[in-house]
Amino acid sequence: MIVDKAKTLLAEAGYPDGFKTGLSCSNDRYIADEQICLAISSMWAKIGVQVDLSVESKTTYFPRMDNGELDVYLLGWASLPAMDGYSVLQALLATNDGTFGGSNPNGLSDPRIDALARSASVELAETKRVDMLKEAFRITHDDALFIPLHQQPVAWAMSNKVDIPQFPDEYVRPWFAQIKK
């Protein structure tokens, strides 16, 4: 049923016979990154999207991504400050103009998103700012600009004599550590 719906959407978008695209992935950066991309390739093949899959080490992958050399690619993102969506809006979704869009090398550009990013960057009223972020993410979702796949788990180990919080961005903040007595 999902396959049929996807084929219908492709036909409505002008691709009744599917299309071909490159899909590039690292194989040593994220948990199961190569397996994720193999699964994507297999799923897309079922709806007529032919994938030219490229899997490589992060040492060559990320420079190629940053240079805009990849069609479709796997990317992870941890927001700083933790859990604030502005980082994603400013770096990934805004047009790369030298100030905004620094991690948007492939030409993604939407004037509505750009206006929201610039407005949110100076908005002091939290409610208004959050509404701007929500609107930008609604546009991103509705236009399928990114396909979120999963949230990567983080595994930690430490002495039972130490207590330190685990943050969703994977960064260790030792100043929060407490030694138990």
Image (cartoon, rainbow, N blue to C red):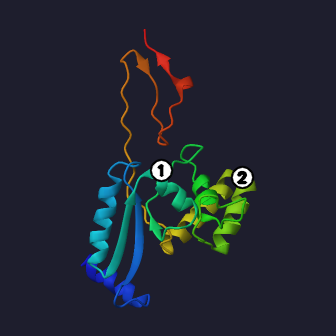
Position of the N terminus, as image quadrant, is bottom left
Residue drawn at x 35%, y 74% is: 51
The x and y percentages for residue 110 are: 63, 74
| SS for dot 2 | loop
Image vertical order of residue 125 relative to residue 108, above or below: above
Along the line of sight, the residue nearer the viewer: 96 or 51: 51
Say what amino acid the circle numbered 2 marks.
Answer: Ala
Q: Residue at x 40, y 60 (%)?
A: 25
Q: Quadrant of residue 6?
A: bottom left
Q: Residue at x 39, y 49 (%)?
A: 30
Mark 1 surroundings: few (<14), some (14-19) or many (≥20) residues within 10 A: few
Local SS, label 1: helix
Position of residue 106 in the picture relative to residue 129 (left or right): left
Q: Give the Cα distance between marks 1 and 2.
A: 41 Å
Question: What numbered label is drawn on residue 59?
Answer: 1
Q: Which residue is mark 2?
A: 125
Q: Which mark is residue 13?
A: none
Sequence-first disc among 1 and 2: 1
- How crowded pointer 2 is (Cα within 10 Å; few <14, some 14-19, many 20+) is rated as few
| The C terminus lies in quadrant | top left
99 lies above or below 143 = above
Q: Position of residue 134 (x, y in %)?
A: 57, 62
| In the displayed structure image, the side of residue 171 where residue 124 appears, left or right | right
Q: Looking at numbered disc 1 in the image, what kind of residue is underneath it?
A: Thr
Please determine whether, in this image, residue 6 is positioned above or below residue 149. below
